[in-house]
Amino acid sequence: MLLDRLRRAKGRPCPYCGVPMTRQGKYRATRDHVMPRALGHDLNNGNCAIVCFRCNNEKADLTLEQWFYRLAHLSDRRALHVLRFLEQREAQGADQRLPRALQSVRYAEPETPLT
Ligand SMILES: [Zn+2]
């Protein structure tokens, strides 16, 4: 159940930024549609992730791939977390649509790692 999942997330690192999630405040656990609801995706087929409010709010209607580009452009270190998250999802085979997005993200990976 969603409420239980959100409660259990307290103290676990947000998969998008690595900051431990809380019950309240900007790092509170929230439910993200990994592929945006605005593009017609529902929560089926593993399209749900528990992430902090700050990341969820900033990602908004972007796909992870689009958000990755934005974060990388801003030299925001969350780009590396987002890339790792995409790789984990690919390894789990959670979503048929992600591997293609991941390929272009890998291609776009900067030569010097973000810090
Ligand atoms: Zn976060």
Image (spheres, rainbow, N blue to C red):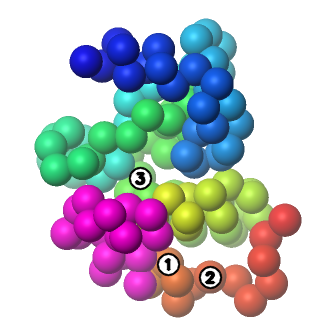
Residue named by callout 1 = 105
The residue positioned 62% from the left and 58% from the top of the image is 81
Mark 1 or mark 3, whichever is nearer to me? 1
Q: Quadrant of the N terminus?
A: top left
Q: Position of residue 83 (x, y in %)?
A: 55, 66
Q: Residue furthest right?
A: 115
Quarter of the image for residue 89 reads: bottom left
Q: Position of residue 99 (x, y in %)?
A: 32, 76
Q: Amino acid at mark 3?
A: Leu
* Mark drawn on residue 109: 2
67 relative to 55, above or below: below
Residue named by callout 3 = 62
Number of residues whose C-alpha sits closer than 10 Å to that of mark 3, classed few (under 14), some (14–19) or many (20 or more)? some
The residue positioned 56% from the left and 64% from the top of the image is 84
Range shown magenta: 87-103
Quarter of the image for residue 108 reads: bottom right
62 relative to 109, above or below: above
Number of residues whose C-alpha sits closer than 10 Å to that of mark 2, classed few (under 14), some (14–19) or many (20 or more)? some
Q: Position of residue 88 (x, y in %)?
A: 44, 63
